[in-house]
Amino acid sequence: MAELTRDDVAHLAGLARIDLSDAELDKMVGELAIILESVAKVQQAPIEGVEPMSHPLPLTNVTRPDVVVASLGAQAVLAGAPEVDQQRFSVPRILTEE
């Protein structure tokens, strides 16, 4: 793998629109080199026959089944409302006409 240079890091920072100081550029050369080495190691893993997955462990949906049940009628819902207007909850206006 080619050696990562300070100019490479400065170019990447420019593409990402990140303003790095000279000290940060020098530090990032080493850090990005370690990251790239780690990615290269992962890419060498034997993956033939391995199906892609979203999680390392199988997940089970823990939601309840979707069952249709009877719901409250409009009169029952609005019975506890402080104010009702044309079968709707009436609330104070918070916005002006402007």
Image: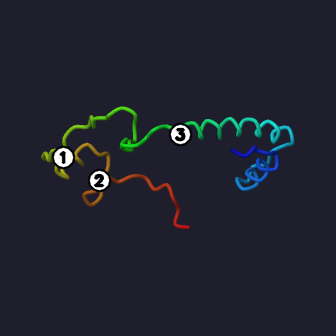
Residue to which mark 2 is pinned:
84
Q: In this rendering, which labeled residue sits more in front, label 1 or label 2?
A: 1
In the figure, is residue 23 to the left or right of 86? Answer: right
Q: Is residue 36 left or right of residue 23?
A: left
Judging depth in this view, the residue of 2 and 58 nearest the camera is 2
Give residue 7's position: percent from left, percent from top: 82, 50
- Label 2 SS: loop
Task: For the C terminus, give its image quadrant.
Answer: bottom right
At label 3, which amino acid type do we have? Gln
Amino acid carrying label 2: it is Val
Q: Give the percent coordinates (x, y) of residue 89.
A: 32, 53
The colour scheme is rainbow
Q: Can you tell which mark lies on residue 76?
A: 1
Q: Along the horizontal axis of the image, is 33 left or right of 46?
A: right
Q: What residue type is labelled 1?
A: Ala
> How far apart are the alpha carbons under marks 3 and 2?
67 Å
Q: Which class describes the residues within 10 Å of circle 2: few (<14), some (14-19), or many (20+)?
A: few
Q: Vertical placement of 15 versus 39: above or below? A: below
Residue at 13 percent across and 45 percent down: it is: 69
Q: Please identify, in this view, whether the residue under mark 3 or under mark 2 is nearer the observer.
A: 3
Q: Mark 3 points at which residue?
A: 44
Q: Which residue is drawn at 16% across and 47% down?
A: 71
Which of the pair 16/97 is nearer the observer? Answer: 16
Residue projecting furthest to the top: 57
Picture disc at residue 87: none
Mark earlier in primary sequence (1, 3): 3
| Lateral position of residue 44 relative to residue 83, left or right | right
Q: Is mark 3 on a helix, strand or loop?
A: loop
Marks 1 and 3, Cα distance to the nearest angstrom? 64 Å
Give coordinates of residue 83: x percent, y percent. Answer: 32, 50
Other-residue count near label 3 (Cα within 10 Å), few / some / many at <14 / 14–19 / ≥20: few
